[in-house]
């Protein structure tokens, strides 16, 4: 049986904000959430531009109506350029938006996911609830480096600083991957107005309780308002139906709240996508803590196949990790000098970036704008591109500041 999805979304301005800079859209089996930034006008416009591009999914779909990974990637690139071009106007300088999008590949039994910024995607499956996406934010980098805890990140004064967003640069890095889904799985896409007010156990309990995505979406928004509603709140849900194996049973909310965590299920293995190349690789984000007791497994056959798939993915991932980890270049401050390094800015698993080329530029001499560009550590696909980026950096003497 082919998989199908039922989708719904809900949004609220919250209890503090004057305007709602969040936007969501549902186009067939594709859902997306955008959280605008840059003031009332700029934030709303950036989010609106983003979902307007996603709305073109139906036009760009294959003859069978299928939205491919390439199509989703092109839509997000187009959305980014729309925001970049609008941000050139002085009154809109600094505008941008997060974006998280998901679409079903019913024949393959996968959901394609893409995200930029700190709007998130979560999966509720077989009683387990985990974050799928990786936040592109300063505090998340601090958490990953072990400098602050997850709990400290919730109240950190710099928690709203993003390291990636639509509108920041024409050469935007987009996280894309696929995840296997089954009948009964539930995907949540949301702005941080939900996750800042409602913790994971409460979100998972609501997803477990409802069979109607519209009811679940409204309840999640209401829960965020009860928590304070200090930001705009937007959620979009994708409930998966069909496929092989039994459907997940609904759980009673009273049986979930306050229960002890059970054992985590095996994580669905995503497929990492970089640009136009697709290769199996490690998960984008670590599974979240198990928060609900696991119901019975769907079938022994499916469990065995899942286990074999996970083993195959992990084995292959070992060989492709080093290639992916070194397939980028960026510039950074090394002992007070601008240096070009090969690798990913934070490293990737066990592979750390290595110095590729020194320059004669002193970091202390850079003007404010160039220093910010250097600190953002944009990744480049070639050494030549990284050299071009460095050559465009200007010093205070050159700008006269």
Image: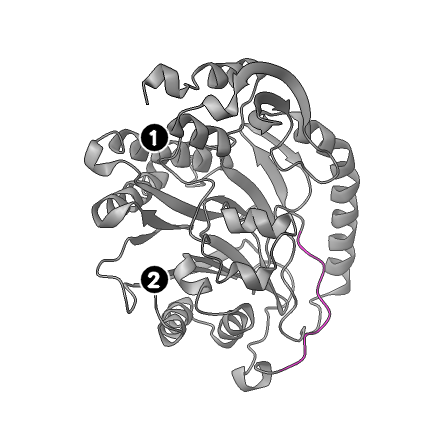
Camera-side residue of 108 and 122: 122
Camera-side residue: 371 or 190? 371
In the rendered view, would you say 376 is above or below 189? above
Check if residue 267 falls in the magenta segment: yes
Residue at 23%, 50% in the rendered image: 40
Crowd band around label 2 with a 10 angstrom C-alpha radius: few (<14), some (14–19), many (20+): many
- Whether tag 2 and tag 1 are in contact, CB under 8 A, the answer is no
What segment is highlighted magenta in the picture? 259-268
78, above or below 301, in the image: above
User: Label 1: how many residues lie within 10 Å, few (<14), some (14-19) or many (20+)?
Assistant: many
Expressed as whole percent of the image width and height from the top left, the position of residue 342 reads 64, 23
Whichever of callouts 2 and 1 sits on the residue coming sooner in the sequence is: 1
* Residue found at x 62% / y 27%: 335
From where the camera sits, is residue 27 visible? no
Query: Can you see residue 279?
Result: yes
- What residue sits 54% from the left and 86% below the top? 254
The quarter holding residue 262 reads bottom right
Q: Is residue 371 left or right of residue 181?
A: left
Look at the numbered disc 1 and give the secondary structure of its residue: helix
- For disc 1, the marked residue is 81
Q: Is residue 305 left or right of residue 399?
A: right
Query: What numbered label is drawn on residue 210?
Result: none
User: Where does label 2 land, which residue?
Assistant: 231
Q: Secondary structure at mark 2?
A: loop
């Amino acid at each position: 049986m082919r998989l199908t999805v039922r989708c719904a979304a809900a949004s609220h301005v919250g209890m503090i904000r004057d305007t709602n800079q969040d936007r969501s859209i549902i186009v067939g089996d594709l859902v997306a959430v955008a959280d605008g930034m840059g003031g009332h006008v700029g934030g709303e416009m950036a989010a609106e531009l983003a979902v307007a591009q996603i709305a073109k999914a139906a036009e760009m779909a294959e003859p069978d109506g299928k939205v491919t990974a390439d199509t989703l990637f092109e839509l997000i690139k187009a959305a980014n350029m729309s925001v970049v071009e609008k941000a050139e106007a002085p009154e809109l300088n600094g505008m941008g938006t997060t974006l998280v999008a998901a679409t079903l590949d019913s024949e393959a039994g996968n959901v394609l996911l893409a995200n930029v910024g700190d709007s998130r995607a979560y999966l509720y499956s077989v009683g387990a609830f985990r974050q799928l996406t990786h936040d592109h934010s300063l505090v998340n980098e601090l958490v990953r480096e072990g400098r602050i805890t997850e709990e400290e990140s919730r109240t950190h004064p710099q928690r709203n600083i993003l390291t990636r967003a639509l509108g920041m640069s024409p050469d935007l890095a987009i996280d894309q991957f696929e995840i296997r889904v089954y009948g009964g799985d539930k995907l949540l896409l949301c702005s941080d107005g939900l996750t800042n007010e409602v913790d994971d156990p409460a979100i998972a309990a609501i997803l477990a309780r409802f069979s109607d995505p519209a009811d679940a979406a409204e309840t999640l928004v209401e829960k965020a308002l009860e928590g304070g509603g200090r930001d705009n709140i937007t959620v979009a849900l994708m409930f998966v139906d069909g496929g092989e194996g039994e459907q997940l049973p609904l759980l009673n909310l009273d049986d979930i709240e306050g229960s002890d965590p059970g054992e985590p299920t095996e994580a669905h293995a995503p497929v990492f996508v970089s640009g136009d190349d697709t290769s199996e690789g490690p998960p984008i984000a670590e599974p979240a803590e198990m928060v609900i007791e696991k119901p019975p497994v769907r079938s022994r056959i499916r469990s065995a196949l899942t286990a074999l798939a996970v083993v195959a993915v992990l084995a292959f991932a070992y060989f492709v990790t080093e290639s992916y980890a070194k397939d980028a270049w960026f510039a950074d401050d090394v002992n007070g000098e601008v240096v070009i390094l090969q690798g990913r800015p934070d490293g990737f698993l066990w592979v750390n970036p290595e110095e590729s080329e020194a320059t004669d530029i002193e970091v202390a001499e850079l003007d404010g704008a160039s220093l910010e560009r250097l600190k953002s550590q944009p990744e480049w696909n070639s050494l030549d591109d990284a050299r071009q980026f460095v050559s465009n950096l200007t010093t205070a003497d050159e700008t006269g500041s």
